[in-house]
Amino acid sequence: MSGPSTYVPKLGIAKWLDARLPLPRLMHDSFVVYPVPRNLNYFWTFGGILMLMLVAQIITGVVLAMHYTPHSTMAFNSVESIMRDVEYGWLLRYMHANGASFFFIAVYLHIFRGLYYGSYKAPREVLWILGCIIFLLMMATAFMGYVLPWGQMSFWGATVITNLFSAIPLVGETIVTFLWGGYSVDNPTLTRFFSLHFLLPFMIFGVVILHVWALHVTGQNNPTGVEVKAVAKDTIPFTPYATIKDAFALVCFFAVFTYFIFYIPNYLGHADNYIQANPSVTPAHIVPEWYFLPFYAILRAVPDKLGGVLLMGAAVVILAFLPWLDTSRVRSMNYRPLARQCFWVFVVVCIMLGWLGSRPAEQPYVFLSQVFTALYFAYFLVALPLLGLFETPKKLPGSIAESVLGKLRGGSGSIVGTAATAEPNTKG
Amino acid sequence: MKSVRFTLAAAAAFVVVVIAAGSPAPALAAAGGVKPPEHNWSFDGPFGTFDRAQLQRGYRVYREVCSACHAMSLVRFRNLAQTGGPEFTQAQVAALAAEFKVPDGPNDQGEMFERPARPSDAFPRPFPNEQAARAANNGAYPYDLSVMAKARNYERGFPLFLLDIVTQYQEGGPDYIKALLTGYTEPPAGVELQPGQNWNVYKPGNVFAMPNMLNDGQIEYPKGADGRPQVPETAQQYAADVTAFLTWAAEPHMEQRKRIGFMVLSFLIIFAGLLYFTKKRIWSRLPEHSPGHT
């Protein structure tokens, strides 16, 4: 996709380095001349936003770790001392805690964009699966990070989630003992979670590099789902066009993020986590952070513990199989009238599961969780496999350029044709 | 097509009904208490600040009433002088600290001793440990109040919880605490309370180990020039003042946070505006500029 490199070093030192380690060439090819489909909308800016969120989380996290004490008797007070006595410690901590939430807001928008525009389809399967791995690592990191302040929700959340592993036959109990470093959630659990919480972001960073690499091999998908056919016509250089657009979107995203940090920093948290962990007092309702609620609802929808754990795991892992579950040859749901409706139902289902995850485990919520869990899986296992076989897609534009320029001329005839067979997406 | 649309509409309607029917009810059922009224605090909203005089009165209420049982071990006397707090003078803080004796040591003889507290000391605990506190309070433990204002909340329900993002309602904790402090009533007929139990309208489950501690005229407030207190010496006023004090104690940098927030947000909005117009300018260089790109 990128084609041969067009980088020409000018300075003497640049030529010298280019012959030895062509790092400037890599940057030039990846972020300056890299061809970007010209019709990307603002949903394509979340990749860049996520990159910056990861860096922001690592920077605030490293500084917080300088002041934090990972010990069950001191962790809670050390976090409070960061809030009170460290210069701008309150800012660092609120940035980091709300940063986790905004990381997930961005990643969910990023994932739903991929679902809608069929970004997971050939030739981007590996790119998509790497994204799923990043998502899984993010979940583990966020979960362990939430344990560190050692409040009531930290402690009981850790107890509930680690206990899930005990459902695994034969080795379950051993795994739980290993996770805990003992026979209950205690100081050894906290110290190993702290260690892993520090490690995992760098693993995420590594997978992100692979993710971007894979992206730059296949090129970006775009709202039409039609591959780039003529680079000169269908694409524009990354810099300045994508750079300035990403920068604008990023600043808008950060404005919202900032609003939460400075004005409602505890809105996304839970009051119980300002109570120090106490193994002998169970909170009235143990709820995870908002970004885990849909999965928590799926977990509790199943009366059987092992079944619930498997289903919750499946809800995440099934994403990785999407490239093969979706049988349609058309990528973008802009051209798939039935799939598009299913997609929006799926979005509503996810929101409802999130709401149900925040309710106590009693009727009618359990029954509703079961209904929406069934609908969640139906999207992947029924709707997407079958729709590809029966659905009649709208006519695709001949090329990206045609879709853009056709609009400019005011004629939409070439885009929204009536029933016609889909043009196969040939790799560009 | 039609049937799919219908399904979609039906699903949407179902969702709305479920949310409308399901949300407010469990909030009350789960809490077992009445939702506290929303008090009008000086620290509400994006430009909210603490009322210094109120925080100073609040400290007096804590000092004379609450501190008999409740520790605030994360707060230090020096905090009482810092910007954005009660802003007592350094001399006042030294005097307030010196009212307390704190254990220190060992000295060069290897013995522990007591000395008057200094501004750098944390508020002393009324009991040496949890067991002693329980033994003195019918088995109930008076919690540390350092972050209490952030550690309590009540469920807002749909759609209030979404509106709270825009209205910046962050005072669930203070509203609950103030209501709780003045929420004592006789138990309803047929409910028998054990010794050490009290009936409170706002407490989830209604049975509360802490008795009513605030009564009208109980604490003497500083007098104004005319020889009369500037605010009424009522239980309601005491409760509001001590709650404001607890809110500051839980969030001592709130004023700085909101002040910086305004600057940061203003900057980002202006910066975003400039970037938007720069983006438009750059994209207009494309020969076949499309309206879809704006």
Image: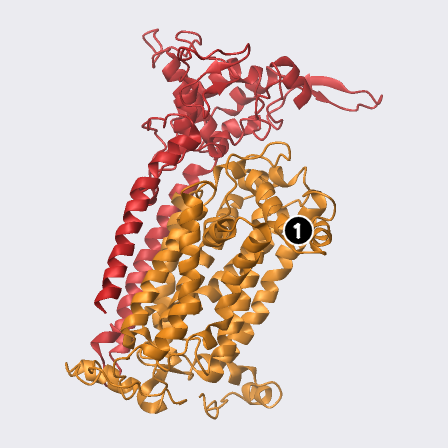
Chain colours: A orange, B red
Quadrant position of the N terminus of chain B in the picture: bottom left
Q: Out of B171 and B55, give the one closest to the viewer.
A: B171
Residue visible at 31% across and 50% down in the picture: B15
Give how far across and how far down residue A174 sits, in percent: 73, 53
The number of callouts visible is 1
Q: Which residue is mark 1?
A: A166
Quadrant position of the C terminus of chain B in the picture: bottom left
Q: Out of B208 and B284, give the one closest to the viewer.
A: B208
A287 left or right, relative to B1: right
Residue visible at 41% across and 29% down in the picture: B174
The subunit letter for the residue under badge 1 reads: A
Residue B44 in view: yes
Amino acid type of the residue that numbered disc 1 sits on in the rendered structure: Ser
Q: Out of A116 and A420, give the one closest to the viewer.
A: A420
Q: Residues within 10 Å of mark 1 (few under 14, many from 20)?
A: some
Q: Is residue A397 above or below residue B136?
A: below
Residue visible at 36% across and 79% down in the picture: A389
Asked where in the image residue B2 lies, by quadrant, the reply is bottom left
Residue visible at 46% across and 83% down in the picture: A123
Give how far across and how far down residue A362 sits, in percent: 46, 40
SS type, badge 1:
helix
A413 left or right, relative to B43: left
Q: Out of B171 and A179, give the one closest to the viewer.
A: A179
Residue at the farthest left position: A410
Residue B167 in view: no
Give how far across and how far down residue A302 sits, in percent: 51, 51
Q: Is residue B56 above or below residue B187?
A: below
A301 left or right, relative to B284: right
Give how far across and how far down residue A425 sits, in percent: 37, 86
